[in-house]
Each structure stands twice: as C-alpha cells, then as structure tokens.
Amino acid sequence: MNCVENEFNSQIEVKKSKFLSFLVPIDRFKELLKELKEKHPKANYIVWAYRELNDFEQIVENSSDDKEPKGAAGAPTLNVMRGAKLINCAILTVRYFGGIKLGVGGMARAYSKSANEVIKKAVLIPYVRVDNFTLSIPYSKQRKCEYYLKELKIDSIQREFLNDKILYRVKTTKEIIDKLNSLFQVEI
C-alpha cells in the first residue's frame, strides 16, 4: 500500500470540460474540500473519494458523485485509488462543464483519467504503520536514549520526568521500538 505526505494536483480537459484533481493526505481532505468550494464557486461539481485505515487496520472508503449521475464520478475515482493501492489519502476533482455532454461512460472515463493523472504526478511512499508507545528509561540512560531517538528520526516525543525514571511517549513503528528495546532493555 502507498500513501502521500504532500498535496499534488493536475488538470486535464475532455470535450471542453476541465477537470482539476488534487491528491492529498487524508488529514487534509475536509479542509481542502472546504477550500475548493470557496475557490471554485462557479465549478459545476466537486467529486471526491478517499481510502483510509481505521484503528483495526481495516480499509474504510467513501466517495461522492456531487450531483453527477450515480456511479459516474466518485466510484471511478475510488477504483483508480484501489488499483494504485492508495491508502490514507483522498482525491478531489473539480469539474467545470464545457457544454458538451459526456454520457455516463464518458464521465467515468474522464474522472478515471483525471485521477490517474494526479497519481502520476504524485510522489508515492510506502505505507508504514505507526503507533503510540511508552518507554520507561532510567535517568542514567537519558543521553543515550535521546541520541538514538534523534538518530532514528522519531519526531513525535513527549517526556515525563518521574522520581526514578523518564517516560517517553513516542509515535513510531514497532520495528523501531524493538531496536530501542534491544539497546536499552526498557519497559514498553
């Protein structure tokens, strides 16, 4: 599975209709949808689809045709995302109607093409599951622990200083926690 860390966009034209597509991380989806509605008040449609993993590692997906014929816009976009094995991201497509009707099949092909174009421009990164972990480190190992946290590029760190130890709350992968555990034999 793949995901994106940044926003990507593309534009295509099909029979005078303009399709502006945006591929974004899932946490940016709602904000971008609101922005697009404000920036493109004359757009005829803003179609979207998203796929994300829930807390149980199950794929949750949804799409909207935004008044296009049912199944002609959101579903084709979602199918493209499935084919690209995208997760934890969304594709939003703004359509300006060019005056020539595309038909249901034509619309499905146009929305699919638009989604494929934005994916081609994107930098896809492999999905890696991250979780929250708590490490318990004696004060004597604080410098060494913080050195390795920095070396392992763990940015999400919260520290709590207790009487006899330091609790580190980190967000990272299980593999990195296993590395830290092998270095320190820490309580997890």
Image (cartoon, helix red, strand yellow):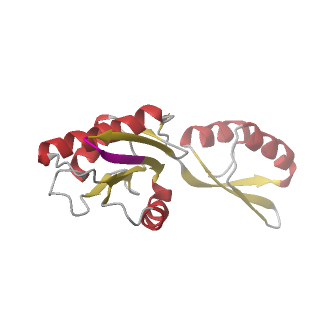
Viewer-proximal residue among 81 and 137: 81
* Percent x, y of residue 138: 80, 53
* 9 vs 84: above or below: below
**Looking at the figure, which quarter contains the N terminus?**
top left
For residue 1, say whether it is visible. Answer: no
Residue drawn at (69%, 47%) of the image: 186
* Percent x, y of residue 104: 13, 48
Residue drawn at (17%, 46%) of the image: 102
* 174 vs 47: above or below: above
* Percent x, y of residue 128: 50, 40
Residue drawn at (87%, 49%) of the image: 140
Viewer-proximal residue among 154 and 82: 82
Viewer-proximal residue among 110 and 168: 110
Q: Is residue 40 left or right of residue 84?
A: right
Q: Which residues are magenta?
A: 15-21
Tag count in the figure?
0
For residue 171, say whether it is visible. Answer: yes
Magenta part mainly helix, strand or loop?
strand
Q: Is residue 21 left or right of residue 157?
A: left
Q: Is residue 86 left or right of residue 110?
A: right
Q: Is residue 123 magenta?
A: no
Instruction: Kindly give the residue lying farthest to the top in the view shown.
Output: 120
Residue drawn at (83%, 67%) of the image: 163
